[in-house]
Amino acid sequence: MFTQIRSALDKVSGIIYGYPAYCSLCSALPVGENGVCSQCIETLENQMTNTCIICGIPLASPLTLCQTCRLNMYYFDRAKSAGIYKGLLKDAILRMKYRGERWLSRPLGHLLSNVAVSMGSVDMVVPIPLEPSSMEKRGYNQAKDLALYVSYKIKVPLFDILIREGKKDRQAKLKRLSRWENLRDTMKVETGCEIPGSIVLLVDDVMTTGATLDEGARALKQAGAEKVLCATLARTVRY
């Protein structure tokens, strides 16, 4: 009976809002028009109450800078995430990414747009490109799906201008230092897409070591970007 009711609500909600009638993370009923319930939003916000001012990893108060950011220089200027990569958020990302549930880019994109707004004004939204073999296998880039929704919500144009090149190993298989080496000089901006003085919002689903975002930021700054701000759905706490 519950399944039938939820299915009927989904159809009505889908027509009106493009979202399911239940929370996309915890399946609670009812839920607001953005597809994520207030309790889940509050839980994620509490996870990110105190974070590193550069890479966005959660820290114990009153710390403001993590050990990694004290030692390293990133190409990106700042990174923030909607929550920690665990539990319900992790499950939703995996469903969107590997199980073909692309509709989740709308409610998850709502969470990401809140992150984008908190980072201030930007000139363009740019998605991290998918590795070519992954794109061929999956058929879509979840980062671009998210970026499209963020672009719509914050009313800033999307420019899908990053190109990913080179035969590299999958990042998920590699340790921290190997991830950085694996991605070195694998991205570039499309020929003719100079962006002098621009403030760019670079979008991806998950930030682990920051290597992928940093490589994207390097390419964007080489093309003339003044600042690169990174927004992701989730941040791993340890690697």
Image: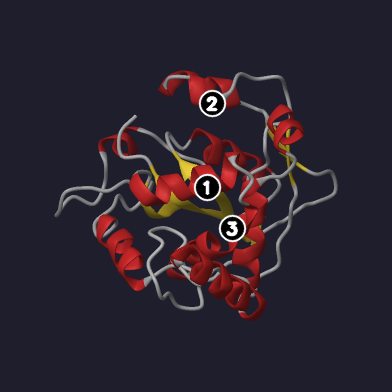
> Sequence-wise, which precedes: disc 3 or disc 2?
3
Q: Which amino acid type is marked by label 2?
A: Gln
Q: CA distance from mark 3 to mark 1?
A: 10 Å
Q: Which amino acid type is marked by label 3?
A: Ser
- Which of the labelled discs sits on residue 105, or is there none? 3
Q: Residue at x 35, y 44 (%)?
A: 86
Label 3 Cα crowd, 10 Å radius (few <14 / some 14-19 / many 20+)? many
Q: Residue furthest bottom?
A: 16
Image location (x, y in percent) of residue 218: 60, 40
> Sequence-wise, which precedes: disc 3 or disc 1?
3
- Which of the labelled discs sits on residue 205, or is there none? 1
Q: Camera-side residue: 103 or 199?
A: 103
Label 1 Cα crowd, 10 Å radius (few <14 / some 14-19 / many 20+)? many
Image location (x, y in percent) of residue 54: 37, 49
The answer to whether residue 146 is above or below residue 113 is: above
Q: Which residue is mark 2?
A: 171
Number of numbered labels in the structure image: 3
The answer to whether marks 1 and 2 mark residues whose Cβ atoms lie closer than 8 Å is no
Left/right placement of residue 169 relative to residue 27 reads: right
Image location (x, y in percent) of residue 106: 58, 64
Label 2 Cα crowd, 10 Å radius (few <14 / some 14-19 / many 20+)? some
Q: Residue at x 43, y 74 (%)?
A: 31
Quick check: can you spot residue 123? Answer: no
